[in-house]
Amino acid sequence: MESLIKLIVYIITKPANTIMSILSSIYETVNSFLRPLKEFFIKFVKSTHHRVGSLFPFHIRETLEGMFLYSGLTRNPEETLGMTMMYSILFPIVVGLIALVATTDHAIALGCALLSFILVWILLYMMLNFLVDKRTGSIEKVLPDLLSMISQNMGAGMTPYNALWSAARPEFGALADEMQKVARDTLTGVPLETALINMSKRVKSDKLARTVKLMVQGMRSGGELPTVLQEISKDIRTEQNLVKRMESETTSQVMFIMFSLIFGAPLLFAASSQFVSVFSQVLSMIDLDSIKDQGSMVSLQPLAITEEGFVMYTIIVLCVCSFFGSLLMGLMRSGKMTRGLPLIPVTMILSVGIFLALRLLLGSLFSGMMGTM
C-alpha cells in the first residue's frame, strides 16, 4: 500500500516539477532578455524627468529642495518636478476622456481636466507640507525629554558633546538621528556650536531653533546650561499641554463639522435630488404647450437641470466641501491645515457614499408614494 502511494505521488509530482522547471527557465530567459531594456527604459525616464525638471525656475527647485530637507527625504528636486509634470499631463487626459464619455460635453471635460491638472500640483505641495509637519511634530514631541536627559547628563559631570551623544537614543526617532549627525560633524572637526546651528536649519521648528540658540549662548557665556535646558523643557511641556487642551475644547466643533460633511449635506442633497426627480416626472406628464395656448395665468416651464446633472453637481460639491472641511478640522485641532490631509479621502468617500445610499433609499420611498397616487 505504501509503495502504491509513493508511486502515485511520484507520478503526480514528477510532471509538476518538470513543468515548473521549464516555466522557471523560460522566465529566466525572458527576464535576462528584457533586463537591459528595462534598465534602459528606467534610465531614459529618469533622465527625461531630470531634463524636464531642470526647466523650472531656480527658486522653485530651491524651495522644493528645502522642503525635502525639512521632511527628511533624499530626492532630487529636478526628477520630482519632472515626474510630477508627467503625471499632471497624463492624469488630466484620462480624467478629461472619462468626463467626455460620461457627459458628452466638451466644456465639462475641459474643466475637469484643468481641475485635475491643478489638483496634482496642489497634492504634491500639501503632501510635502504634511511630511514636514509630521517630522517637525515628532521632533518637538520628544524635545523636552531629550533636553531633560541632556541636562541630567551634564549635571552628572559630562561635557556637552558627551551629553548630546549619550542622549541620542533610538526612541527619540528623527531627533536622535539629528543628534547623531551633530556628533559626526563634531568628529570631523566642525565646532559643536556650528553643528547645532546646522541641525536647527535642517528642521522646520521654531522651538528647536530657539533651544539651540539658548544652548549656544549658554556655552559661550559659561552659564548654568543644565538649568537653562530644564527651564526650556518645562516651557515646551507647558506649551504642549496648552495645545492638548485646545484640541479637547474644539472636539465638539470638529464633530459638528464632521457630522455636517458626512451626514447633513448628503441628506439635504439626496432630498433635493428626489424633488428634482419628482418635479421632472410631474412636468413630463403635463402638456406645457397646451397651457400656454389656452392663455392660462399659470406659467410652467421645464426644469433647467436634469437629475443626472444635479447628481454630478452634488458629487463635486461634496468633494470640495470634504476637502476644505478636512483642512478646517486640522486647523482647529492643531493649528495646522496639513494635519487634516489624512481626513480628506475618508470624508470624501463617506459623504459621497452616504449621499448615493440615501438617494437610493429616498428614491424607493418617493417611487412608492408616486405609485399610490
Image (spheres, grey):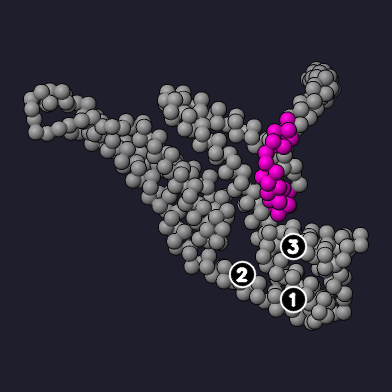
| 326 drawn magenta | no
Q: Which residues are magenta?
A: 48-73
Q: Which residue is mark 2?
A: 240
Q: Disc 3 and disc 2: Cα gap in Å?
A: 20 Å
Picture layout, residue 125 above or below residue 103: below
Q: Name the quarter where the N terminus is drawn.
A: top right
Predominant SS along the magenta part: helix
Image spot of residue 256 (x, y percent): 42, 58
Picture layout, residue 60 above or below residue 192: above
Front residue (pair 81, 326):
81
Residue at image point 53% right, 65% down: 247
Q: Which residue is mark 1?
A: 229
Task: Name the side, left or right, on which 239 lies relative to 354.
Answer: right
Amino acid bearing label 2? Gln
The local secondary structure at tag 1 comes to: helix
The answer to whether one can see residue 31 in this image is no
The answer to whether one can see residue 29 in this image is yes
Report crowding for label 2: few under 14, some 14 to 19, many 20 or more residues within 10 A (C-alpha): some
Q: Disc 1 and disc 2: Cα gap in Å?
A: 16 Å
Image spot of residue 312 (x, y percent): 40, 34
Image spot of residue 294 (x, y percent): 7, 25
Q: Disc 3 and disc 1: Cα gap in Å?
A: 16 Å
Q: Earlier in the sequence, mark 3 or mark 2?
A: 3
Report crowding for label 3: few under 14, some 14 to 19, many 20 or more residues within 10 A (C-alpha): many
Front position among marks 3 and 2: 3
